[in-house]
Image (cartoon, rainbow, N blue to C red):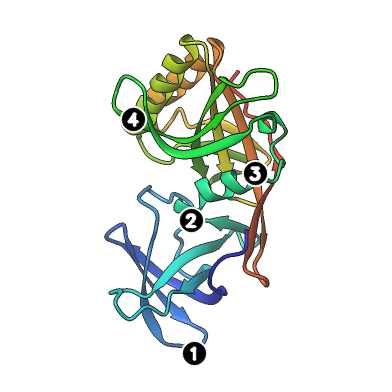
Amino acid sequence: MQLQKKLQEGVLLKRYKRFLADITNKEGESITIHCPNTGSMKNCQEPGSRVWYSDSENPKRTYTCTWELVEVDGKHIVGINTGLANKLVHEAITSNSIEELTAYGSLRTEVAYGEQKSRIDLLLEGTARDPDALCYVEVKNVSLGLGDGLGSFPDAVTTRGQKHLQELLHMHTQGHRAVLLFCVQHSGIQRIIPADDIDPEYGRLLREVASKGVEVLAYRADFDVQNSCVTLREKVPVLLG
């Protein structure tokens, strides 16, 4: 995926009020930028880290620049813009990069569904064998690296995420495919585990729905900072044992 605006580099000073971050840009100026991540951003907001941001050049915005990437551990790139996850998965599906989801004829986004008035991130519809086939895909962004190639989700307690697991299981019991897809925006993560130490209930529910037929997949993003491009490419295992 080609980002709309060229990435610019800076150094993180601090993140605060959830949606704001102060950085020093290449010119040595301190500027405030928008942080498009409502999570804890654990391990991804160390002052002094290299960051990359985009500039909307929109004077109507209070903060024209948006934080996109951060370097962690001095070597790994992490995408902190959670709004990019759905777009990355959408692009990967339409380009047939996710082998498990290549059979469908159409794709819709943010479709109302379920028992708890939810909206599914992606709804795939119709295959050559079954024009009425439905596949519900819920996307979760993974940015929490634990070292040694290990990553986990979530990075904070997520009752919303718990609800989504319940909704996926409900759709599976109705006879449809239900898929939880982890979009791994961390170049150093090679395998995923549930963050039981952060949200044990999410971990319990994830294992339960997986044992009952909800499919759990994870694909990792590749970052081309120089060309302002992010692409979902490589499948990584999700370990639930």
| Residue corresponding to mark 2 | 80
Q: Give the spatial CA distance, label 2 vs label 1.
A: 23 Å
Q: Give the spatial CA distance, label 2 vs label 4.
A: 24 Å
Q: Please name the amino acid that badge 2 sits on.
A: Ile
Compare marks 2 and 4 and give the one earlier in the sequence: 2
**Do the numbered discs 3 and 2 sit on residues whose CB atoms are within 8 Å?**
no
* Viewer-side label of 2, 4: 4
| Residue corresponding to mark 3 | 94
* Viewer-side label of 1, 3: 3
Q: Give the spatial CA distance, label 3 vs label 4.
A: 24 Å
| Residue 184 percent coordinates (x, y) | 59, 44
| Residue corresponding to mark 1 | 27
**Mark identifier at residue 118:** 4
Q: Please name the amino acid that badge 1 sits on.
A: Glu
Q: Give the spatial CA distance, label 1 vs label 3.
A: 40 Å
* Viewer-side label of 3, 2: 3
Q: Please name the amino acid that badge 4 sits on.
A: Ser
Residue 101, above or below 42: above
Which residue is located at x 69 percent, y 36 percent?
236
63 relative position to 49: left or right: left
